[in-house]
Amino acid sequence: MNDDTAIHRDVEALRAGREPRCLARLASGWAVFGPRQFVRGYLLLLPDPVVPQLNALTEPARAQFLADMARLGDALLRATMAVRINYAIYGNVEPALHAHVIPRYADEPEALRTAQPWAYDWASAAPFDAAASAPLAAALRRELGIA
C-alpha cells in the first residue's frame, strides 16, 4: 500500500493535533472538514489506522466505519437542515480509504442541486476556514454527543 497519500499525512497530523480541519475523533477514525467547502459542512471520515480500501477492514471495523459515516450524516442533517446527505467512497485519486459526507441543500444553485457533487468547481470553492466553521463545528459536536 502507498503510505504517502494525503490521507496518511492528514491522519498523522490529526494524531499530532496539528490538523485545524479536525471535527472529532470517532471510533473508526477522524471526522474532518473538507479542505474546500464547496457546500457548507462538507466532511470526510478518515480511518485510523489507514487502510487501502473498505474491503481491507475486518467485518467489525468495516461496520464501525460505515456506522460512523452514517452518524456524521445524521449529525449534519440535524445541525444544518440539509435536504439529504450524499455519501461517497472512491479512493481512486488517493488510494487510501476515506469517505466523503456531503450535505445537500435546497438553496444550492438549481443546475447543481440534483447533480453529483463532483459537478461543482472545487478549485474555486471556499477553502476551509476554522473561524467561520466554528459555529457549525460546535453544533456538530453537540449532535455527535462530543463535548
Image (cartoon, grey):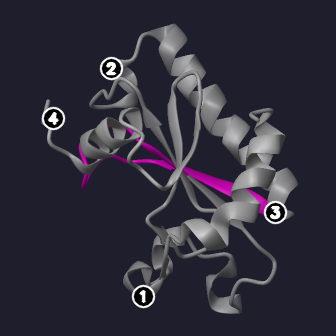
- Amino acid type indicated by mark 3: Thr
The x, y position of residue 126, in whole percent, is 50, 81
Element on which disc 3 rests: helix
Q: Tell which tag, 2 or 1, sits nearer the viewer.
A: 1
Q: Amino acid at mark 2?
A: Ala
Residue tagged by mark 3?
Answer: 80
Contact between labelled residues 4 and 3, with CB atoms less than 8 Å apart: no
Asked whether the beta carbons under mark 2 and mark 1 sit within 8 Å of each other, the answer is: no
Q: Marks 2 and 4: in contact by CB < 8 Å?
A: no
Question: Residue at label 2?
Answer: 56
The amino acid pointed to by label 1 is: Ser
Picture coordinates of residue 34 (x, y %)? 49, 60
Which stretch appears magenta? 84-100
Seen at 41% across and 50% down, the residue is 19
Nearer-N-terminus badge (3/4): 4
Q: Quadrant of the C terminus?
A: top right
Residue that badge 4 annotates: 3
Amino acid type of disc 4?
Asp
The residue at which mark 1 appears reads as 124
